[in-house]
Image (spheres, rainbow, N blue to C red):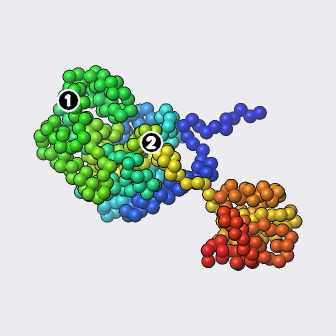
Amino acid sequence: MSDISKEPYKGVRDFFPEDMYIQQWIFNGMRDVVEKYGYVEYSASILEPASLYRDKSSEEIVNEQMYTFRDRGDREVALRPEMTPTVARMVAAEHKKRSFPLRWYSIPNVFRYERPQRGRMREHWQLNVDLFGVNSLFADVEVITIAHDLLSSFGLNTDQFEIRISDRGLLNTYLSSLELNDEQTTQLIRLIDKRRKIEADKFETGLNEICGEKSRDLLSLFEATSVAEIRDSLPQTDEVKEKIDRLEDVISKLKEGGIENITFDPSLVRGFDYYTGIVFEVFDTSEENNRSLFGGGRYDRLLETFGEEHIPAIGFGMGDVTLRDVLETYDLLPEYESPADLYICVVSENVLEHAHTVAQQLREKDVRVVLELAGRAVGTQIKDADTSGIPYIICVGEDEAQSGEYTLKELESGEETTGDIEAIADIILGE
Ligand code: HAM
């Protein structure tokens, strides 16, 4: 007996054909939506130098979650934990050759050493949608509209999810007015990021420990539900005023565009150092699955860190794990279907060669055919075709082999038609 485990490595998934079917359905749905907005696909290697993520990602990801190893040339290599540093690197490398704006998307596999739990794995696939080179608030509106469109196109209605939005710069400004040291600020941001995941009194105690009396002001700030409510609590600088006006504008433009399920959330952090402006996160509103689905934001300074000129950027990352969970919760995932159109059932071993020729002739006409090779009972073959979701079947026996005429049965309706290969192909292909 072998003691090699049949389980995959902890926190990663095997994709059996039924899982691949769902995954491809999800990816195709993502592609359909983003391409409607003119986004084009790019890709890159899973491997990156680990140094790419230092100062360009989040401290938590770099120090606690990144998979790294030393290659044979003693270089430190990472399995990418996210796509943003990679795409920023690619855009910075080519920006002189390309005309902006760039609308790029990709669906990479990314890896993070996290504690596996519902919605959190050590690997996931993540749709990344990013728009480079546009400062206008219409870029923010476009990207958030795509996020909304994606969930709607998968069948979710607007009561089932909500978009929370804020501006990372506003929170930063507020936090710097608290005069905390760097360590306290880092701790505080981490705690705020957990606000929705931990109990209210635990959050309050944590706040108290970090910023004492000022925690009361912070708590009341977090209660605000409109941008107007926080206006007076912030330092009255031109920068703050500009950010507040922009945030209000973005929210109202989205609402005018029919996106009503958007709310202001001043405690929205998004744990990456590179966000500079608007940040947003999409939440499932159900009791059962009330959690963040995906998020993103504006990162106007990241490309400068490659020593290149200022290129503003905004985008988001949408993971397949949380998306699949929410679609499952609302019963919106499709039933598995085999890609084949036709199952050729072989009645006896001595007609197998003939059946093989028929299968090949049909494939030449672009019919996707599964041929029985295992000599199983006819009933078993038909059942197999049916459970695999193959829509048509023909049975090949002595009579069919002699006449060259086959009876095509549509399994769902039970309807039968007899004809030669040409006629059968025409029916299946709807010609
Ligand atoms: P993020 O919030 O770290 O952002 O990840 C984006 C999404 O990926 C999450 O909201 C979630 O759907 C999914 N995700 C993240 N970690 C896991 C995990 N361990 N298991 C399953 N799913 C996960 C970013 O990565 C940014 N780079 C997104 C971005 C693109 N910002 C601008 N452009």
- Look at 72% across and 65% down and name the residue there: 393
* Amino acid under disc 2: Pro
- Look at 51% across and 49% down and name the residue there: 331
CA distance for labels 1 and 2: 35 Å
* Amino acid under disc 1: Asp
Mark 2, secondary structure of its residue: loop
Report the side of 413 relative to 372 (left or right): left
Query: Residue 308 appears at what percent x and percent y?
Result: 29, 52
Query: Residue 127 appears at what percent x and percent y?
Result: 44, 51
Looking at the rendered structure, which numbered label has been put on residue 115? none
Within 8 Å of ligand 1, the CB of disc 2? yes
Within 8 Å of ligand 1, the CB of disc 1? no
Which one is earlier in the sequence, the residue at label 1 or at label 2? 2
* Image: 225 above or below 215: below
Q: Which residue is mark 2?
A: 81
Q: Residues within 10 Å of mark 2 (few under 14, many from 20)?
A: many
Q: Residues within 10 Å of mark 1 (few under 14, many from 20)?
A: few
Q: Which residue is mark 1?
A: 217
Mark 1, secondary structure of its residue: helix
* Quadrant of ligand 1 in image: top left
* Image: 87 above or below 355: above
* Closer to viewer: mark 1 or mark 2: 1
**Disc 1 to disc 2: CB gap under 8 Å:** no
- Dividing the picture into quadrants, the one containing residue 431 is bottom right
Examine the rendering and report whether any part of residue 226 can be seen.
yes
- Look at 65% across and 71% down and name the residue there: 428
